[in-house]
Image (spheres, helix red, strand yellow):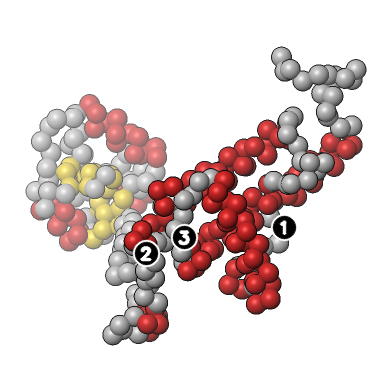
Amino acid sequence: MSNEIMDERGRPDDAPPPDAENDEKKQESAVLSIQGRLTEWHALEPEDRQRHWGDLVDWVIWLYDTYELGREYRLPKCWPEHPGLVQELWSLKCWREALYTTKPNEGVTHGRRAGSLALYTRGWHNELRSLAAQIKFYAPKCLTGHKRSTLAEDYPEDDLRTKWAAADPLGGVQAPDPAPEPVFELTERDMRRRITGGEAEVHPAGLPSVVASRGHWWIGNLETGMWQRVDDERIVEQLDLLAEDFEGEDTKLSEPQDLSNMQIDGHGPDGA
């Protein structure tokens, strides 16, 4: 049983009336859903970026002190000189401001809404720890002083823009060849090749006009010189049952035989 104090209608004493609760849920949903899109840091207007920069610096100072990011160099002091870190911190700041408020009369500290929001704040903290743990991804050599990596346009000897634009988007790895189209009919010559190569065996029951090849039964007619793959489920089932009774016998074909009179349950080669 919850420790929340219930009012005479069975709701927690901090729960708003039903209509107000629905309105609050809608507001909460609006906060947690995407309303438009977040402006990329580099796409801000210069005056807006300058204004937000001061806010970001103040926020990073607070973050640096609150979460002790100076320990073990969790956040390098040269972070403003690493554009990737600026982007990461900018997104963390926007995310946190969407979750938290500094206005006591607008925030919640207990009840269902607080529990729901707490899950999102745990996600925010997980991302902060992930960033701190992977800081060398952005600043691998800055433990002994800031060392900015070479910019693409300043890369020695190569025009990287041209080189990257001309690169193979598949990285030299070609897509696998598509599966071959299924074969439903073979000529006498093709079937003889399978027989010679050991890829075809006569039916174990000794049916001379029925051959097993590559996972399928085939019925041949030497009058037409064609072999038809058996796809009729009824015939396949009968052939399978017959094969079970004669399993283990050596039935490899040497030459095709006259299959024109072969019938299975009323079905001849032409009806396979």
Report the residue at 65% width, 72% height from top.
Answer: 50
For residue 166, say whether it is visible.
no
Instruction: Residue at 50% x, 46% y: name it.
Output: 68
Identity of the residue drawn at 72% across and 18% down: 2
Number of marks in the image? 3
Q: What element carries label 1?
A: loop
In the rendered view, does 15 fall on the left or right side of 244? right
**Residue at the spot of label 1:** 35
**Nearer to the camera, 171 or 15:** 15
Q: Distance between the residues labelled 3 and 1?
A: 33 Å
Three-letter amino acid code at disc 1? Gln
Q: In which quarter of the image is the N terminus?
A: top right
Q: Which of 245 and 108 is in front in this view?
A: 108
Question: In the rendered image of this protein, does residue 166 appear above or below residue 209?
Answer: below
Q: Is mark 2 on a helix, strand or loop?
A: loop
User: Where's residue 229, x and y in %?
Assistant: 31, 50
Q: Is residue 220 visible?
A: yes
Q: Which of marks 3 and 1 is nearer the N terminus?
A: 1
- Taking depth in this image into account, of 269 and 104 the one nearest to the observer is 104
In x, y percent, where is residue 224?
Answer: 26, 59
State if disc 1 and disc 3 touch (CB < 8 Å): no
Density class for disc 3 (Cα within 10 Å; few <14, some 14-19, many ≥20) is some
> Label 3 amino acid?
Lys
Residue 31, given in percent of the width and then of the height, sits at 73, 49
- Kindly identify which numbered label has been placed on residue 77: 3
Q: Mark 3 and mark 2: span between their CA atoms?
A: 9 Å
Label 2, on which residue? Answer: 145
* Marks 3, 1: nearer the viewer: 3
Disc 2 marks a residue whose amino acid type is: Gly
* Discs 2, 1 touching: Cβ within 8 Å: no
Q: Is residue 186 above or below residue 24?
A: below
Residue 89: image location, x then y, percent? 55, 58
